[in-house]
Image: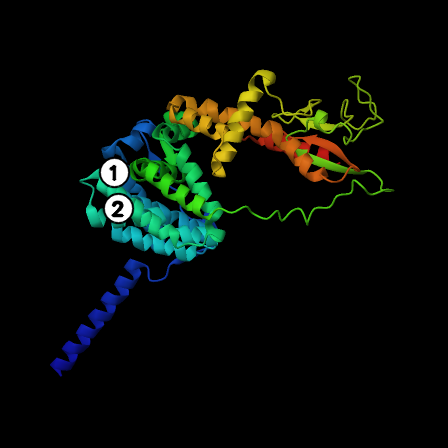
Amino acid sequence: MRRILFIACVCILVLLAFSLYAEETGSEKKKITTIDDLPRYTYDVQTTLTELITSKELFMSFAAEVRTDIESVLGTYEIEDKTTFKNYLGILVSLDMLYGNYDKALGGIEKVRELEDKPARKLMMGLINNAIIQAQREVGYDDETVYKQAFSRYLSESIDELPWEIIQERVEEIKGRMELFSENVLLGMIESQFEAAVLKTHQISSDVAAQVIGIRYAIEIQLPLKNEIVAVYDKYIKENRVVKADIWKERSVDLSETDNLQPIVVAIWDTGVDTEVYPDQIFVNTNEKLNGEDDDSNGFIDDIYGVAYTLEEEKTTELLYPIENAEERLPRMKEMMKGLLDVQASIDSPEAATLKQKIASMHPVEVKPFLEDLMQFILYFHGTHVAGVAVEGNPFARILIARLTADYRTIPLPPTVERAHKSAKMYREVVE
């Protein structure tokens, strides 16, 4: 009887312990369908972001805090959104690579690959990290030359097995990005976007924390292998590149030889259009005169070719995105923009060479004005470019311009309720 009672007591204790363990470990995760249901974290930063990224001691403490929070989230919640889940796993992979936890990194890479839907990204997932790990395990890092040779061999073997027709654009994208990266550029990018706010609040959000970790990973893990990565990808591109068939030629419609068609208005609601580019295809409001008055009583002054709003959502008669000293700056900006597009497309050109040379010598404080120059030019030409796409092959199209104004600055104007109301009013007025 005592033996039976003892066994029963043991069983009860085991069941009780199992029950407590299940509660302790959270046997059922909370299902999350939207990112807004996840906890938000902030991290104290008592230095500059540059110091946080470049200081081993400061970064280790910060990274440990971020890892704890991410592992807590992944252990507590069942995240259905693939992008959010991949982002969390990607941060952990970067941290594992930084601290040499290669088995964990490889496991994380496989998990991210399983979640990836895009074929090119799926095939190339972890390609560089895998080559780094293989080279480290084979030859170590004592001899830098031998290590880099091993890395190049593994990376080349891996990418040579992949189908060019699927990964072409992804390979060109990564090669172009690597060619433009330097420590100064990476630090300058994060300084220009977040440093001012950090110096004021001494805190960063989890989103910024992820970027800080990404910058540290890029500087410490990938940048030392920049030349090798570019060389391997360049070789792969040159060996596989073929001239693509022009799929648009047979899909395009050309009405230039068609008779008896009536003009049709095509509204281009973008960053503005240069009317001089399409002199014969601009819509003309015949009820309006260029006299500083609202002749047709529609709420807009001098809206002969269209309407426009400033960054502050105020009405203006300027239909093209404004740029100071345009005549002086545009040739240089055009060259830089072409260089950027050529680098991204892996095209060797004088403009691409000039851009790479400029970026290679760029100091962190020069990154912000450089990026803002490029963004200004993009906003300046974007609407005109879109208009050209819209009316190509259709001489009967008449472009009605509707200009909105985006902020070119890396730190845009802060959102306010007043601006939100003005934006809504602007949208309504343009549509009406």
Toward which corner of the image does residue 196 lie, by quadrant? top left
| Quadrant into which the N terminus falls | bottom left
Foreground pick, 109 / 222:
222
Q: Is residue 408 visible?
A: no
Pinpoint residue 414: horizontal percent, then vertical percent. 52, 28
Q: Mark 2 is on which residue type? A: Ala
Label 1, residues with CA under 10 Å away: few <14, some 14-19, many ≥20: some
Outermost residue toward the right? 260
Q: Residue at coordinates 20% horizontally, 74% vertically from top-left?
A: 11
Q: CA distance from mark 2 to mark 1?
A: 29 Å
Query: Disc 2 vs disc 1: Cβ atoms closer than 8 Å?
Result: no
Is 105 on the left or on the right of 414, as rendered? left
Q: Say which residue label 1 marks.
A: 60
Task: Decide if residue 281 is on the left or right side of residue 22.
Answer: right
Residue 263: where, in percent of width, then height? 82, 38
Q: Identify which residue, 137 or 293, lies in the foreground.
A: 137
**Residue 359 place in picture, x, y as percent:** 41, 26
Q: According to the image, label 2 marks what residue? A: 150
| Residue shown at the point (47%, 24%) measured from the top left | 370
Residue type marked 1: Met
Q: Residue at x 15, y 81 (%)?
A: 4
Q: Quadrant of the C terminus?
A: top right
Label 1: which secondary element: helix
Between tags 2 and 1, which lies in front? Answer: 2
Q: What's the residue at 81%, 28% (across, down)?
A: 285
Taking depth in this image into account, of 213 and 329 the one nearest to the observer is 329
What percent of the width, then of the height, locates residue 155? 33, 48
The answer to which of 158 and 202 lies nearer the viewer is 158
Provide the secondary structure element on which disc 2 rests.
helix
